[in-house]
Image (cartoon, rainbow, N blue to C red):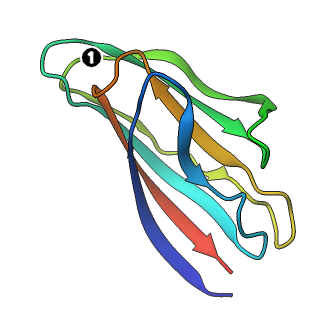
Amino acid sequence: MANDFQTISAAAGTAYAAFVDATTDSSKEKTVHAIYIANVDGANSADVSLKLVDASGGAVTGGTILHEVPVPAGTTLVIEKPINLACGAGAAGRALQIKASAAGDIEATASVLEMS
C-alpha cells in the first residue's frame, strides 16, 4: 500500500463548496489528519461550517462537523482528530465541504493521507 501525504487548501465562500474530496477514486483511501481554519480578516469575526457529503453531494446523516462556529479576526481554529473519507478500497467515498459567513475571510488547509 502506497502512502501519499497531501496539503489541500481552499478559501471558503458563503455557500458550501468542496474542500477535500474522496469521491472520485474508489481505489484510494483518504484520511484527514488535521484541519487549520484561519480568519484572515484583521477586523471582523467570521463563522465557519464544515460537513461531510456523499458522492452525489448529499448530506450524510450526522455529518456536520462544525456549524457556524465563530473564528475571531486574526485567529486560527484547529481540528486535530482524523476524519476518514473513504473506509476501504471500493467503499463509497465522501467529501468535506466548507462555508463561511463572509466571503474572503476564511481560509482552510487540510493535512491529508492518501493510501492506495
Nearer the observer, 83 or 98? 98
Nearer the observer, 99 or 84? 99
105 over 112 or under it: above or below: above
Nearer the observer, 56 or 59? 56
Quarter holding the C terminus is: bottom right
Give the percent coordinates (x, y) of residue 53: 72, 39
Name the residue located 61 percent from the left edge and 54 percent from the top edge: 21
Examine the image and state in which quarter residue 113 appears.
bottom right
Give the percent coordinates (x, y) of residue 23: 72, 57
For label 1, the SS is: loop
Q: Which residue is mark 1?
A: 72
Judged left or right of residue 61, residue 110 is: left
Judged left or right of residue 92, residue 11 is: left
100 over 108 or under it: above or below: above
Disc 1 marks a residue whose amino acid type is Pro
User: Which residue is farthest bottom?
Assistant: 1
Name the residue located 75 percent from the left edge and 59 percent from the top edge: 86
27 over 71 or under it: above or below: below
Nearer the observer, 7 or 81? 7
Name the residue located 79 percent from the left edge and 61 percent from the top edge: 87
Give the percent coordinates (x, y) of residue 39: 27, 27
Name the residue located 78 percent from the left edge and 44 percent from the top edge: 54
